[in-house]
Amino acid sequence: MMQVNSSLNKFLVPILIVALATSCVRSKPSGSSTIPYVENILADTTSAEYSLISSFDESDNQGCIAIIGTPEECFSISEELMTSDMFDNIDGRRVPDGLPDFAGETILSIIDEANSPYEGYLKAQNSEFLRELTVREVLSALDPKCDLSPFDQKHSTMKPVGKIIILASPIMTDYGFFDVDTIFRYADKDIPMISMKDTSESVSSKCYNVLRKKDAFTHNISFPKAEGLITVPSSVVPTSDLANPLTFKDAYKYARTPNSDKKTFSVIKYSDRYLSEESLTLLMTMAPKTYQSYVQDQYQ
């Protein structure tokens, strides 16, 4: 172990590049308007939702890499980032150096167990709720707090803040990217978002290049760490609308009313008991390093 730490100390020095003097300019979507949920946020810049974005510190590189999507999408991308070694960590050349590309980083997955799969919203002609769902989960990625359990109504536990957001679901990108981008542009915040629509480049390569361009690596000397959050039905949802404590009935899930004050799902700290047996098996088999980090984090 001492030998590994020595290697990390030797190679993981701060990357000496100059940050861009100006932030990236976001392209302006045309032809469509945003959803009422976003309009309400923009109409009240004192709201908690707007404050999460307006208070975002672009100079703080200690945040996490946040992944949002279905369990399978989150596990796949998290494991890729945990194990990636395509670049030289000192000069950024595309040459493996035997050290993790995302050394020192925290990879946080918002595992959308409760609200996925997303195709059902389209079949139910409820794409507005899907757009709103994307915005709400991006806001969760930027929030320094989350719920401890489905019964936590006070947002009582801390979590890392996303410094870059990966929309792991192409459907979320199609239906929600515009709305998230609208808030970001309105608040004049350059919060990087990576879409999985473009598969010409690996997600790890995209993420590495964005962090290097913005000089946003933590520069901490440690192995990558994975943390998980899980979406679960809120305790206020009637049991008659649940298939089981962790799962909405489809008839309820896909027909939820957009722009409602009712909180139908919670984003909580990872625990094995809040994942379905199917998702837990999937996590353990396709993302062993991610799962190991989740378990270690539970007992620290």
Image (cartoon, helix red, strand yellow):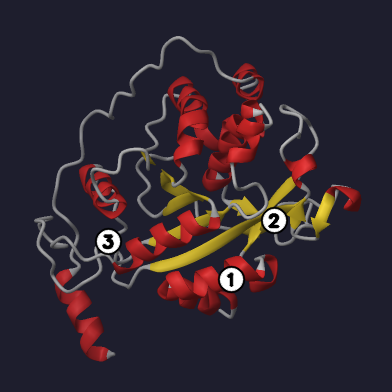
On screen, 208 above or below 126?
below
Q: Are marks 2 and 1 in contact (CB under 8 Å)?
A: no
Amino acid beneath label 1: Leu
Pinpoint residue 214: horizontal percent, then vertical percent: 25, 42
Of residues 58 and 111, the one drawn nearer to the viewer in this rendering? 111
Camera-side mark, 2 or 1: 1
Of residues 215 and 267, the one drawn nearer to the viewer in this rendering? 267
Q: Are marks 2 and 3 in contact (CB under 8 Å)?
A: no
Indicate which disc, 2 or 3, sits on the residue closer to the N terminus. 2
Q: Is mark 1 on a helix, strand or loop?
A: helix
Q: What element carries label 3?
A: loop
Q: Name the residue under label 2.
A: 147
Pinpoint residue 52: horizontal percent, then vertical percent: 56, 37
On screen, 82 above or below 188?
below
Residue displayed at 57% across by 50% down: 144
Q: What element carries label 2?
A: loop
Please identify the residue farthest to the top as the structure is shown. Answer: 31
Q: Name the residue under label 3.
A: 219
On screen, 25 above or below 217?
above
Pinpoint residue 60: horizontal percent, then vertical percent: 38, 47
The count of marks equals 3
Amino acid beneath label 3: His
Q: Mark 1 points at which residue?
A: 280
Marks 2 and 1 sit apart, C-alpha to C-alpha, by 20 Å
CA neighbours of label 2 inside 10 A, class few (<14), some (14 to 19), many (20+): many
Pinpoint residue 120: horizontal percent, then vertical percent: 64, 39
Amino acid beneath label 2: Asp
Indicate which disc, 2 or 1, sits on the residue closer to the N terminus. 2
Residue displayed at 56% across by 18% down: 34
- Residue 106 visible in the picture: yes
Residue displayed at 20% across by 75% down: 9
Residue displayed at 74% across by 59% down: 246
